[in-house]
Image: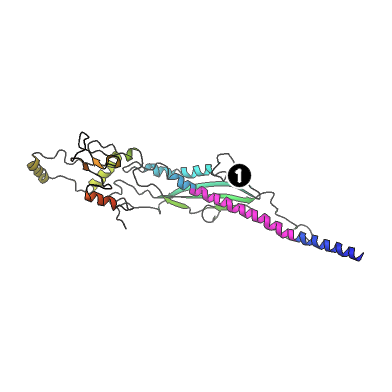
């Protein structure tokens, strides 16, 4: 009989230790899953804000020269934020548009995701004096942030062995409500400040019409032609005075026709960087108008090989 009571006592001790151990193990497991879900959903909130920025880079932003209204209107309308909110309303940019504004996982629910974008004037790039205003306009950048509400689901155990006299816990061990989450930073007074920023527009020729060559007498790339002419006339060195007209008359027998007209030729690789003599023949009267690789003109060849990442007339570092 003594031995039997000893074995029963040992079995009872093991059950007690298992029960006490499960209190810790189950609590750690539940909270581990819950906090992992909070981390995952928080990254999705951040992803929605950065997605709005990168998607905006594919939009039409200007028409050269000097027309940057598409970019300004895009930022002011907050269209990027609206599109990102729609795409990430279910916290998954891959599926989206399924009408689910609330996502429920094992122990965590998420809802109210909202992406907002606005102008970021502190992000800017100033072109050189010859191109600024005349061709380009410093519109600035755009900043995006996102917010959402995360909370434990209803089935989450907020009370455990904490009721009645002699309870294991005398207060609820988890009484947290909704957790405001921002894409960047912490919510202050329920608001998400700041955000991720980007300088928009590549300041380059962007449309199909702006990528064409510019033939000397019939330039199809009017955007490039008008932009170059604006910079040229800004220099104030294009006027032809009476002395130059007289000199031309003495040499060639006639004054220049329309001396104030701007002439420009841009030829690309497809044309071998050559402006063809009228008639299209390839002879010694053809001439290069654009610096190219392996140019037969030393100055152009040097210019092409010395190109760096600086642009818009700014001095290379």
Q: Viewer-proximal residue, 31 or 289?
A: 289
- Examine the rendered structure and indicate whether residue 179 appears above or below residue 251: below
> Is residue 244 found left or right of 10 in the rendered image?
left
Q: Residue at x 77, y 60 (%)?
A: 18
Can the viewer see residue 262? no
Asked if residue 30 lies in the magenta stretch, the reply is yes
Q: Residue at x 25, y 50 (%)?
A: 301
Q: Viewer-proximal residue, 81 or 307?
A: 307
Asked if residue 294 lies in the magenta stretch, the reply is no
Residue 250: image location, x then y, percent: 7, 42
SS at badge 1? strand
Would you call the spot at circle 1 few (<14 residues within 10 Å), some (14-19), or many (20 or more)? some
Q: Quadrant of the N terminus?
A: bottom right
Can the viewer see residue 45? yes
Query: Magenta span covers which residues?
Result: 21-50
Q: Residue at x 54, y 49 (%)?
A: 45
The residue indicated by pointer 1 is 102
Say which quarter of the image contains residue 161.
Answer: bottom right
Main structural element of the magenta stretch: helix, strand or loop?
helix
């Amino acid at each position: 009989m003594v031995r039997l009571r000893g074995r029963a006592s040992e079995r009872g001790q093991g059950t007690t230790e298992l029960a006490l151990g499960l209190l810790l193990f189950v609590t750690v497991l539940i909270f581990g899953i819950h906090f992992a879900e909070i981390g995952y959903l928080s990254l999705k909130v951040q992803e929605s804000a950065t997605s709005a920025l990168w998607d905006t880079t594919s939009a039409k932003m200007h028409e050269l020269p000097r027309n940057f209204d598409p970019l300004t209107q895009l930022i002011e309308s907050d269209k990027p934020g609206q599109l990102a909110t729609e795409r990430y309303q279910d916290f998954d940019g891959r599926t989206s548009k399924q009408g689910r504004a609330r996502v429920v996982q094992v122990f965590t629910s998420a809802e109210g995701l909202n992406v907002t974008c606005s102008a970021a004037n502190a992000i800017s790039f100033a072109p050189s004096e010859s191109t600024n205003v005349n061709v380009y306009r410093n519109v600035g950048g755009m900043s995006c942030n996102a917010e959402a509400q995360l909370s434990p689901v209803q089935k989450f155990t907020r009370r455990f062995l904490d009721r009645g006299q002699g309870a294991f816990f005398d207060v609820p061990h988890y009484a947290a409500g909704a957790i405001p989450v921002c894409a960047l930073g912490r919510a202050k007074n329920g608001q998400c400040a700041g955000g991720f920023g980007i300088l928009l527009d590549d300041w380059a020729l962007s449309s199909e019409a702006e990528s064409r060559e510019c033939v000397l007498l019939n330039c199809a790339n009017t955007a490039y032609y008008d932009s170059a002419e604006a910079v040229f006339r800004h220099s104030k060195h294009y006027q032809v005075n009476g002395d130059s007209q007289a000199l031309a008359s003495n040499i060639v027998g006639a004054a220049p026709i329309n001396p104030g007209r701007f002439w420009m030729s841009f030829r690309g690789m497809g044309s071998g960087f050559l402006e063809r003599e009228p008639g299209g023949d390839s002879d010694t009267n053809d001439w290069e108008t654009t610096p190219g690789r392996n140019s037969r003109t030393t100055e152009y060849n040097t210019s092409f090989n010395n190109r760096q990442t600086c642009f818009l007339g700014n001095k290379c570092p």
